[in-house]
Amino acid sequence: MVISMGLMRKTYRYCLIDRRGCVHCGCTQFEQMRVIDDNLAIAWGLSKRERKWLDRREGSRCRDCGMSKRVRMLLWSIKKLYPFCSDLKILHLNQTNALGLPLKKLGQLTETVYYPDKPFESIVNGCLNQDMCQLKFQDNQFDLVVHSETLEHLYDYEQALAEVQRVLKPGGFQVYTIPLLFSRRTRCRIKRDEVRRLVYTLSPSFHGCQDEFPVIWEFGYDFCDQRTHLISEIHFDNYWRNQTVFALVECKPS
């Protein structure tokens, strides 16, 4: 297994997020669903162990609120950073299911969606339509920015992360998840040529169904290496039992 152990020693936090029940509703019962289908497992090149890890990450649902383990991990990290706050300015990009309600308890919440066929800055389904790579917010506006499972669908994910840094207040945090396998390097499934035509370097792959956005990036350990200077913490549920259940925390320098 290839992994940046220097980074891991610096940022690793061991959590066991479900030991007292669901971090959102307190329920102590969870049900397991199968999420990773055969086509995705083959396209992604998953081993049996990696497929089991990702099924646990996405398919372990709270029986009361339905929150997945990935989202519970994200919420655990946010509560760890802000255990007593109720006056934050929060930006929730691309509206992760089940996360809106607990975020509202922490302060003033702005939620976005992405519909490229609709006017940006318009309201769609109660959320603000925004392109994460070109956010229409002023600099230094939010205390906390949250996003989950979005970067792998963006051609220029580094620009998106830079936009988040721009709209964060100094000392503010962005907390996010990505599907990442520490045993391999990042690979790109789709590129754009010099005239912005799509070039498939690997066969098309989708997380969920083919009506959703295609997978552009499959992230590996080098993603964290490239952002070592910005990543302040990585929160794992239990790295030694499941390397895919984690949240990344980046802090904007004061």
Image (tube, rainbow, N blue to C red):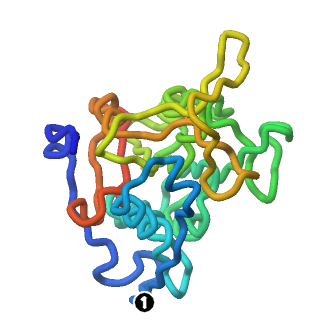
The quarter of the picture where the N terminus appears is top left
Horizontally, residue 92 falls left or right of residue 29, namely right
Residue 223: horizontal and vertical position, in percent? Answer: 36, 35
Q: Give the residue at mark 1.
A: 29
Residue 15: horizontal and vertical position, in percent? Answer: 25, 66
Instruction: Please report the residue visible at 25 percent of the width from the left and 66 percent of the height from the top.
Output: 241
Total tally of numbered discs in the picture = 1
Location of residue 225 by image quarter: top left
Horizontally, residue 226 falls left or right of residue 127, namely left
Between 66 and 203, the residue placed more toward the observer is 203
Location of residue 131 by image quarter: top right
Circle 1 — which element?
loop
Task: Give the class, few, some or many, for how many residues have Cα within 10 Å of label 1's Cα (few <14, many ≥20).
Answer: few
Instruction: Please report the residue visible at 65 percent of the width from the left and 53 percent of the height from the top.
Output: 111
Question: From where the camera sits, is residue 89 visible?
Answer: no
Furthest residue in direction top, as rendered: 194
Instruction: Please report the residue visible at 45 percent of the width from the left and 37 percent of the height from the top.
Output: 169
